[in-house]
Image (cartoon, helix red, strand yellow):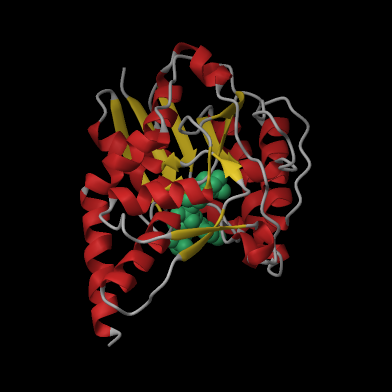
Amino acid sequence: MTSRYLVLGKNGQLGRCLTRTLDARAGCELVAALGRDEVDLADAASLARLPEGDLGSADPWLLNAAAYTAVDQCESDVDVCHAVNGDAPGALADWCRERNVGFVHVSTDYVFAGDAETPYREDDPTAPRTEYGRSKLAGEVAVLERTPAAWIVRTSWVFGPGKNFVGAIVRQGVLREAGKAEGPLRVVADQIGCPTYAGDLAEAIVTLTQCNQAGAGGLLHLSNSEACTWWDFARAILDAAGYGHVEIDRVSTDAFPTPAPRPAYSVLDTTKARGLGIEMRPWREALEDYLAGDDFSALHQSLRDEVAVAG
Ligand SMILES: NC(=O)c1ccc[n+]([C@@H]2O[C@H](COP(=O)([O-])OP(=O)(O)OC[C@H]3O[C@@H](n4cnc5c(N)ncnc54)[C@H](OP(=O)(O)O)[C@@H]3O)[C@@H](O)[C@H]2O)c1
């Protein structure tokens, strides 16, 4: 049986990886990948543009990788943030339920308070401390109230094709290599989480739609395994990308005040996913693969070009 898929958020990190996974995976057919131009989740009326006619099959799915992810901007752009992350997922869940379409919606570690000392399980109490987190939690609640068979996949610290921490750190290496910056980087060493490669997350999500319990639905934590600090992550990035000589100072969260407070601890417990047969590898292995791939080599070259032009 061929499963047929619609993907929202096609230009984001996860959306791009989902389209690649679906193109490559046997038994999967990508019917359409849509970006903001086609379906704007801030505009409820634009859901009418979802191409339902093309989805007809025994096993149709909608995968929502679109979200308002600018965490600090959410603090001031509250209405749009809640429309995209809180209201739209509920409307998408209605759309799926009415058409008997499976739904996977993606959420975040920011739904938790971030002050735990052991990994968060799916049923642990939520207590978001940011507008982004509150909006994403509202989206979770709306989806599961309306369509209990939907899956809500919570993830953390995503890197892949797009704008992310890996690119920001490598840019600092490129600047130093070009003699346009000097001295050690300063990276936060008191926040702990699990980096997650968007390519691995996409594979896991598609596997979820194909596993026997896919009809069950509910909350599911998916991140690469092994926790670290942002400092550890930055060190590994520089070492693996050829900038091992660049030093990094460990600083505390207070050194970088942000409009949205960052969680001190956001490790997700992935026991439930392992029970479904979905095992995520350690983030260091995933990072190595990402740095060896075409996405990173294109990014690396563009950073070098940008730094060279900057004079
Ligand atoms: N990035 C992380 O560290 C992280 C951590 C935990 C959870 N998550 C969750 O993981 C999922 C995927 O994140 P990601 O890292 O792939 O995010 P991303 O790279 O920022 O991509 C998000 C996509 O959503 C699209 N989008 C934003 N507003 C929209 C709107 N009004 N209508 C339609 N599309 C809109 C963006 O479109 P444009 O390209 O047009 O801007 C972008 O392509 C999200 O649900 C996010 O909340 C991410």
Of residue 50 and residue 164, the one placed in the foreground of this image is: 164
| Residue 76 picture location, percent across and down | 71, 70
Is residue 38 among the parts visible in the rendering? no
Of residue 161 and residue 227, the one placed in the foreground of this image is: 227
Q: Is residue 243 above or below residue 3?
A: below
Of residue 193 and residue 210, the one placed in the foreground of this image is: 193
- Residue appearing at x 71%, y 42% in the figure: 114
Side of 144 relative to 165 (left or right): right
Q: Is residue 109 above or below residue 299?
A: above
| Residue 81 picture location, percent across and down | 66, 60
- Residue appearing at x 62%, y 59% in the figure: 71
| Residue 231 picture location, percent across and down | 50, 51
- Residue appearing at x 70%, y 51% in the figure: 135
- Residue appearing at x 32%, y 50% in the figure: 239
Of residue 229 and residue 297, the one placed in the foreground of this image is: 229
Side of 67 relative to 168 (left or right): right
State the quadrant of the C terminus. bottom left
State the quadrant of the N terminus. top left
Side of 88 relative to 40 (left or right): right
| Residue 101 picture location, percent across and down | 50, 30
Q: Quadrant of residue 218?
A: top right
Side of 128 relative to 167 (left or right): right
Q: Is residue 137 above or below residue 79?
A: above
